[in-house]
Amino acid sequence: MTAPDPGTSALELRAVTKRYGTGQGGQVTAADDVTFTIEAGAFVALTGASGSGKSTLLHMIGALERPDSGVIISGGTEVTALRGAAQADYRRTVGFVFQRYNLLPALTALDNILAPVLPYRTSWDKRQRATQLLAAVGLAGREHSLPARMSGGEQQRIAIARALINTPALLLADEPTGNLDSATATDILDLLARLRAEHQMTIVLASHDPQIAARAERLIRLRDGAVIDDIQLTKDRPVQDIIRHISQLG
């Protein structure tokens, strides 16, 4: 597998298409000739109604699914050309954060963070890094807590720490605040922004919520799997104007 090159664009999609059968002889287009480039270190939001293709794009970028056609290049690696062990190696270089947290209920907070790297040899101390990440997400001292004893926001913080255990250059977040109240969602977004700056990560976040999407620097709007709008969000533009613009996009 080609090692990520920080001098290249973080992510490039070229004419990516993905269709699913409906079971009744029809097809649903989840990605329709999608083409865009994301620069390294950017914070980009994919937005659109449920079923617009946001999650499918993230899954294909992360090599959890394969497109029917097109090319995906991440950090200099042609993701769509990977197979077998090379594909598995690539997946370990990408951080994933999901709406439902996906924590293992029988494992402690620390062990959940460690889970992705436990089967592998590393050149660094796994437990030390997991402990540092736990502190970085504001949960120092909660090493032995089980998910059932934690709030939704705390569980999502654990999920974020777990996603960072391999120090990924790319973090994919699929509706990461969808199960959280607005105050906790703001805290999670603030945390992602801080960790992005500290780790020089590229973040691609999928959300149907205009207020969440407005926190990004760039907005890619999807409908029926196709890109219908791609706008740069500027800091001097009032947030409410951005939210209104996103809401008005059909």
Image (cartoon, rainbow, N blue to C red):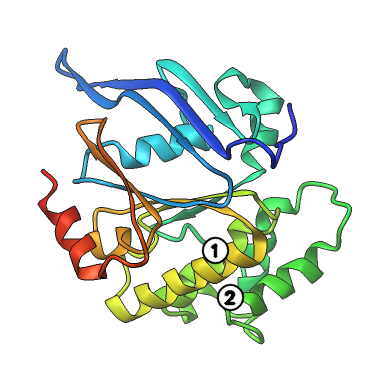
Give the residue at mark 1: 160
Compared with residue 53, is residue 189 higher up or lower down, i.e. above or below?
A: below
Answer few, some or many: residues within 10 Å of disc 2's Cα (few below 14, many 20 plus, some between 14 and 19). many
The residue depicted at 39 percent of the width and 60 percent of the height is: 176
Q: Is residue 187 left or right of residue 132?
A: left
Q: Is residue 97 left or right of residue 178?
A: right
The residue depicted at 36 percent of the width and 35 percent of the height is: 56
Is label 1 in contact with label 2 (beta carbons under 8 Å)?
A: yes
In this rendered view, identify the residue nearer to me: 118 or 196.
196
> Earlier along the polypeptide chain: callout 1 or callout 2?
2
Which of the 4 image quarters holds residue 9?
top right
Q: Quadrant of the C terminus?
A: top left
Tell me, for residue 137, which label it has, or none. Answer: 2
In this view, the residue farthest toward the front is 236
Residue 159 percent location from the top left of the image: 53, 63
| Residue type at numbered disc 2 | Val
Mark 1–mark 2 Cα distance, whole angstroms, equals: 8 Å
Residue 178 visible at all? no
| Residue type at numbered disc 1 | Ile
Q: Quadrant of the N terminus?
A: top right
Compared with residue 29, is residue 74 higher up or lower down, i.e. above or below?
A: below
In this view, the residue farthest toward the right is 123
Q: Secondary structure at mark 2?
A: loop
The residue depicted at 52 percent of the width and 37 percent of the height is: 62
